[in-house]
Image (cartoon, coloured by chain):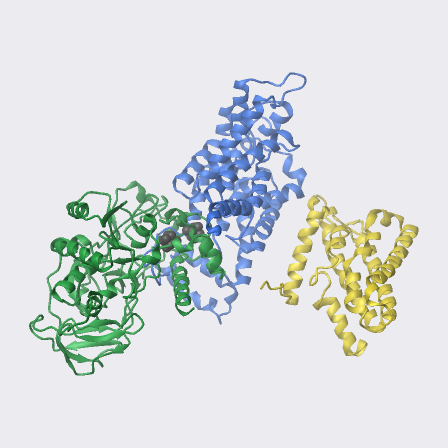
């Protein structure tokens, strides 16, 4: 690795203040620091620091996503890789441009956005839509707010929302059946389990959902992998367990309650199934179907856009869960995960404010 | 070093409780400054000869606390800047002692013999006014930060002095309650102290978990719900020194310091006079570039290269290697050799091990990502990133609204921060600004 | 072209300020509502800007002529009457000669009355300055409004409908960006426009004290 080090050292002067390429200094530094740990030392106390840095923090999220990524490539073919590539390229470009203009470092948050975004798109999404979406997500979802750490909404979700509204025909039709690219499925396209449930009252079996037989967004079909990744994230303390768990629990409870009161969609004239068992199944189906798992494990728990107070995290998770089920059952949309998380993102500062003012209420009086 | 939130990191180079043999120095270099004190008023002239216990300089801001000569010898003011050097040290160190004379009451004696400057007010951490009396005195009998002197080493044969010193201080401060901060676990020493406490109603043992920074007196005061304005703290050595000053008129010029850190050959304790040349105690393993930290690695300050001798408030020295190498692709390495708060390093699969730490920042500075680690680590239950944000935006009143006054400057929040934000620096700056405002306003 | 030669020193400054430095939309954020609503198609934008420019000029002439005799207490009413008269003319003309556009613009033509640019310029400029300068100011501000509307409209029309002035300009296989036809899309475009022009013109956001 000595030659690489020397290469960096020798090209460094070009990027210094007077150098020809000074404009691209953030890019150069980012690449250098990816290969070689920055030589930064502590200056004042604490003189020793925890070795975890933001790069590793973000990398862990990508590691947790690996099962989903691999599964999506297995199910939907190498074009998923292309989508990821486009997402990274375009999003990275926006990020680098902003860093260069603002003369700040390139922040690592984009590593996660760039991989999350293609995974929440339908697998057949045209590449140019991926590009437009990630551009929009990074630009309006993050950079206009001031970059990583200052954004209000999850950038990947902002991008997804934008392409959903902008290109409804592309984004809501044409769900590729998993395995179709290798000829492993009989039909090329297939309705998603949530759509089947809503329109035809066909509930996909739980086992099928877990191993990813039905169609869905690129990363959300192999639910076992999502669960493993999510638990890994929580165990490493990179995501806080409170948001995903309260989200998932409230989705189940909410769907269960709606099921008990006869809210389960039914086919044609037949009466809606009711009873305890049916309600339980409906709850389980809502928990596993659609993108609830993926959303809860990887999107809702984004620490920047969810509340930082502990009670706030629970409120946030429960809010997401309740909204998701409400949208699924009572609105025209078949899936509500995306909307619910974005809506709750908007409420995040308010939740934190209320929790803080309750916690420190006595302080102001005295 | 155990922290809040299930955190346990072992660092290499913890000083053992043994005391190293004393080697007579050639000369003493007494710095005219220390963490809290600044001896700007010189009382001796260049070339004068001094006896042990003679006043060399005073700090006019802090109630004229003196800097005493630890040994007899000749003064050299020109040897180094902001130092008093004592040369030609007399052969027998205890031969003659400066006349203390009749200085009035016991408080004046403590002041004159250099013990008073060990006291600290809990709210501002400054030397308290000798005219005032505290409601409570808090003495922490344990150190959970491994690099500071272990009271066990100090009390090995000073336990009697310690208890009678407490008694004297209690009487001196008009029946102030005395709290001893001790760990939950049992030990012989604790048994002795408990015995003393059971026979004296004013002496209380306060048991705390064995976790850093539960030994912090200000933290103990918070948990005891004592007003920090009316509580003072003193370390174990200070209590012993107070006893000896009041009993034998002995000046407080020698102290126990710990010398440790990954770079030291034999980390242990030393009993040394103030001004003892640093070069003689720091016995390094290698020629690597090092940083000497006075105090613990979390809260201490770096010793300037220009400082030659032990300063008057130094408790321990920790020698860390400066980071020089650059790791390759550090963020994707499994990390078997690094311990961290998060379980993102493969070292979680290994049993606890001692780790050699350098001054590596461990990453790049970034905006806060609200990971919440600082909040989980903070012992007093405030939200460091929130307070940091307000202080950074120059809105201290909001920071105080969120209980910034509870912060005890333990430095854990900065230690765990993923984004390498240095909360501690900003918090200390704000506190010193507030104290200055208080004094001037 | 030298503005100074053309309009004199003061006039040049007025024109420059109106068109760029104190751009009514980007620096004062006036006239946003119509800029958002009427910018989805270029033809609507043209009609709208023409209407606004006409009313602005009319108001400028009348108010600046009357500026010495308008009692300051009732000046707002006088502005309103003048503007309303202009707007009515525009509305009737559109209805008579361009019924389709008039239909498309719906209530926004009568609502020119509330366009803050006109009111704002009347209060800030016309009532204090001679006719010639006021005229220049009206023209400059109208143009600024017009070209902004046009820029946004061109962008939105191409992306949202794939056409320009109703003529298809996009290649086959083009997918319309539905979001840009909706007012929400206009927000993004206008927002970006404001950001870029403000940065270029060096407009500082108002400092909070
Ligand atoms: S805020 Fe930081 S320095 Fe203060 S007590 Fe909490 S962890 Fe320690
Ligand atoms: S540890 Fe650092 S990054 Fe995490 S919340 Fe605290 S200040 Fe923010």
Q: Is residue A155 above or below residue B271?
A: above
- Which quarter of the rendered picture does the C terminus of chain B lie within? bottom left
The reply to whether residue B81 is in sight is no
Q: Nearer the viewer, residue B436 or B131?
A: B131
Quadrant location of residue A1? bottom left
Q: Nearer the viewer, residue A316 or C146?
A: A316
Q: Is residue B147 above or below residue A133?
A: below
Point 64% across, 41% down: residue: A164
Question: Residue A199: where, in percent of width, then height?
Answer: 65, 25
Q: Nearer the viewer, residue C139 or A24?
A: C139
Q: Colour of chain C?
A: yellow
Chain blue in the figure, letter: A
Quadrant location of residue A232? top left
The reply to whether residue C37 is in sight is yes
Question: Residue A318: where, in percent of width, then height?
Answer: 52, 36
Image check: B314 left or right of B383? left
Q: Residue furthest right?
A: C96
Point 29% across, 56% down: residue: B135
Point 41% across, 64% down: residue: B434
Question: Residue A358: where, in percent of width, then height?
Answer: 49, 45
Question: Residue B363: where, in percent of width, then height?
Answer: 39, 56
Q: Is residue B435 above or below residue A117?
A: below
Q: Colour of chain B?
A: green
Image check: A237 left or right of A119? left
């Amino acid at each position: 690795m000595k030659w690489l080090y020397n290469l960096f050292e020798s090209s460094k002067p070009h990027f210094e203040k007077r150098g020809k390429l000074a404009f691209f200094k953030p890019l150069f530094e980012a690449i250098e620091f990816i290969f070689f740990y920055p030589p930064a030392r502590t200056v004042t106390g604490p003189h020793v620091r925890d070795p975890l840095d933001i790069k590793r923090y973000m990398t862990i999220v990508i590691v947790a996503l690996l099962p989903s990524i691999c599964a999506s490539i297995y199910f939907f073919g190498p074009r998923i890789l292309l989508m990821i590539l486009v997402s990274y390229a375009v999003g990275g470009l926006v990020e680098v441009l902003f860093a260069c203009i603002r003369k700040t470092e390139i922040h690592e948050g984009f590593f996660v956005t760039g991989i999350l975004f293609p995974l929440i798109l339908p697998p057949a999404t045209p590449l140019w839509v991926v590009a437009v979406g990630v551009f929009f997500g990074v630009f309006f979802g993050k950079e206009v707010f001031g970059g990583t750490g200052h954004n209000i909404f999850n950038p990947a979700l902002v991008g997804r929302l934008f392409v959903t509204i902008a290109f409804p025909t592309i984004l809501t039709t044409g769900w590729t059946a998993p395995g179709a690219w290798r000829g492993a499925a009989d039909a090329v396209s297939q309705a998603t389990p949530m759509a089947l449930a809503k329109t035809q009252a066909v509930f996909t079996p739980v086992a099928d959902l877990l191993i990813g037989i039905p169609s869905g967004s690129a990363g959300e079909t192999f639910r076992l992998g999502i669960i493993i990744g999510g638990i890994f994230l929580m165990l490493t303390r990179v995501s806080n367990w409170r948001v995903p768990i309260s989200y998932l629990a409230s989705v189940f409870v909410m769907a269960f309650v709606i099921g008990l009161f006869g809210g389960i969609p039914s086919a044609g004239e037949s009466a809606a199934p009711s009873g305890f068992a049916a309600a339980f199944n409906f709850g389980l189906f809502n928990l596993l179907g659609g993108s609830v798992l993926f959303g809860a494990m990887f999107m809702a728990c984004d620490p920047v856009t969810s509340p930082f107070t502990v009670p706030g995290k629970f409120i946030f998770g429960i809010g997401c869960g309740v909204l998701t089920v409400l949208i699924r059952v009572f609105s025209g949309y078949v899936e509500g995960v995306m909307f619910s998380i974005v809506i709750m993102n908007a409420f995040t500062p308010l939740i934190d404010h209320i929790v803080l003012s309750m916690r420190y209420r006595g302080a102001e009086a005295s | 070093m155990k922290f809040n939130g299930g955190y346990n990191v072992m660092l290499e180079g913890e000083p053992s409780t043994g005391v190293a043999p004393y080697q007579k120095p050639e000369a003493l270099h007494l710095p005219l400054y220390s963490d809290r004190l600044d001896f700007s008023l010189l009382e001796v002239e260049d070339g004068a000869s001094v006896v042990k216990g003679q006043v060399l300089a005073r700090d006019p801001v802090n109630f004229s606390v003196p800097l005493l000569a630890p040994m007899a010898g000749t003064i050299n003011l020109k040897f180094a800047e902001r130092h008093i050097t004592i040369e030609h040290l007399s052969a027998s160190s205890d031969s003659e002692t400066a006349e203390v004379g009749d200085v009035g009451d016991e408080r004046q004696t403590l002041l004159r013999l250099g013990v008073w400057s060990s006291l600290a007010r809990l709210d501002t951490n400054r030397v308290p006014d000798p005219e005032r009396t505290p409601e409570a005195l808090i003495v922490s009998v344990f150190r959970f930060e491994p690099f500071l002197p272990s009271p066990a080493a100090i009390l090995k044969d000073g336990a009697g002095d310690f208890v009678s010193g407490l008694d004297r201080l209690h009487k001196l401060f008009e029946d102030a309650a005395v709290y001893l901060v001790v760990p939950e676990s049992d030990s012989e020493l604790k048994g002795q102290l408990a015995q003393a406490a059971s026979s004296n109603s004013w002496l209380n043992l306060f048991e705390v978990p064995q976790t850093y920074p539960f030994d912090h007196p200000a933290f103990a005061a918070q948990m005891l719900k004592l007003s920090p304005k009316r509580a003072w703290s003193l370390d174990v050595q200070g209590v012993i020194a107070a006893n000896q000053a009041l009993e034998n008129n002995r000046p407080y010029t020698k102290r126990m310091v710990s010398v440790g850190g990954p770079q030291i050959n034999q980390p242990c304790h030393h009993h040394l006079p103030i001004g003892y040349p640093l070069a003689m105690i720091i016995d390094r393993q290698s020629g690597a570039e090092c940083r000497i930290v006075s105090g613990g690695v979390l809260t201490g300050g770096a010793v300037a290269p220009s400082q030659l001798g032990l300063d008057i408030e130094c408790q321990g020295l920790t020698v860390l290697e400066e980071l020089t190498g650059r790791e390759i692709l550090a963020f994707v390495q499994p990390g078997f050799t690094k311990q961290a708060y998060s379980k993102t390093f493969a070292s979680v699969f290994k049993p606890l091990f001692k780790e050699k730490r350098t001054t590596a920042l461990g990453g790049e500075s970034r905006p806060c990502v609200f990971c919440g680690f600082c909040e989980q680590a903070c012992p007093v239950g405030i939200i460091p990133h929130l307070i940091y944000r307000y202080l950074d935006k120059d809105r201290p009143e909001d920071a105080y609204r969120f209980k910034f006054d509870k912060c005890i400057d333990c430095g854990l929040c900065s230690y765990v921060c993923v984004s390498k934000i240095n909360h501690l620096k900003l918090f200390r700056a704000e506190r010193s600004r507030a104290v200055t405002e208080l004094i001037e306003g | 072209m030298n503005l100074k030669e053309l309009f004199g020193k003061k006039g040049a400054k007025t024109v420059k300020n109106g068109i760029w430095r104190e751009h009514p939309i980007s620096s004062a954020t006036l006239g946003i509502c119509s800029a958002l609503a009427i910018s989805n198609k270029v033809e609507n934008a043209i009609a709208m800007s023409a209407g606004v420019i006409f009313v602005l000029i009319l108001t400028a002439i009348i108010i600046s002529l009357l500026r010495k005799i308008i009692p300051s207490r009732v000046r707002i009413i006088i502005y309103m009457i003048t503007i309303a008269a202009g707007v009515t003319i525009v509305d009737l003309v559109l209805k008579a000669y361009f019924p389709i556009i008039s239909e498309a613009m719906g209530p926004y033509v009568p609502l020119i009355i509330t366009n803050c640019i006109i009111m704002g310029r009347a209060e800030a400029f016309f009532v204090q300055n001679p006719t010639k300068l006021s005229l220049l100011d009206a023209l400059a501000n109208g143009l600024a409004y017009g070209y902004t509307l046009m820029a946004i409209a061109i962008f939105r029309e191409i992306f949202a409908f794939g056409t320009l002035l109703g003529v298809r300009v996009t290649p086959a296989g083009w997918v319309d960006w539905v979001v840009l036809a909706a007012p929400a899309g206009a927000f993004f475009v206008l927002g970006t426009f404001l950001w870029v022009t403000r940065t270029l013109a060096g407009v500082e956001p108002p400092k909070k004290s």
